[in-house]
Amino acid sequence: MPRFDPIFGPPAEPDVEPAPPEVEELEKEDDGTGSDDPWFVVLFNDEVHTFEEVIGQLVKATGCSRGEAEDLAWTVHNEGKATVYEGTFEECFEVQSVLKEIQLVTEIQG
């Protein structure tokens, strides 16, 4: 046992840094809303809306030209569905919201 020195006090502890705590690094779980991931709005065909309604809503929702909206409407009609928008999840959510104003059937895919 080290002796106590009345002039210098107790013996000095050696300069030893404590070991860092063990930390397990976890990868961030992808919640699917990352801005790097492309997201898509898919529009499905229905027998309820006219071409004019669909075209008008596509222009309103996506900002595309009338000609592009007409092409998309024909694709939806002939193939049963079409990707009508690509962007971030938040952008796709906004586009989908506008399309749903007239109850168009849509889905966001990522």
Image (spheres, grey):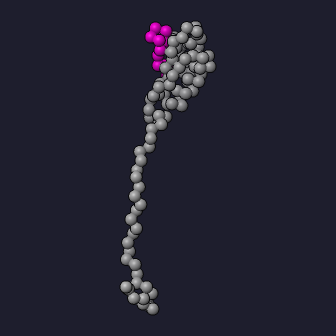
Q: Residue at x 47, y 25 (%)?
A: 109
Residue 67 visible here: no
Q: Is residue 13 rendered magenta in the image?
A: no
Residue 17: quadrant of the picture: bottom left
In the rendered picture of this protein, how many numbered marks are placed on residues? Answer: 0
Counting from the top left corner in percent of width and height, residue 20 is at 40, 62
Counting from the top left corner in percent of width and height, residue 71 is at 48, 11
Q: Residue at x 45, y 87 (%)?
A: 9
Q: Is residue 7 above or below residue 51?
A: below
Q: Between 64 and 53, which is closer to the camera in this rendering?
A: 53
Is 14 left, or right, of 60 in this rendering? Answer: left
Instruction: Report the span colored magenta.
Output: 75-85
Counting from the top left corner in percent of width and height, residue 103 is at 60, 17
Residue 88 visible here: yes
Which quadrant is home to the C terminus?
A: top left
Q: Residue at x 42, y 90 (%)?
A: 5
Residue 102: quadrant of the picture: top right
User: Which residue appears farthest toward the front when viewing the image?
Assistant: 1
Q: Residue at x 51, y 30 (%)?
A: 89
Counting from the top left corner in percent of width and height, residue 39 is at 47, 28
Which quadrant is home to the N terminus?
A: bottom left
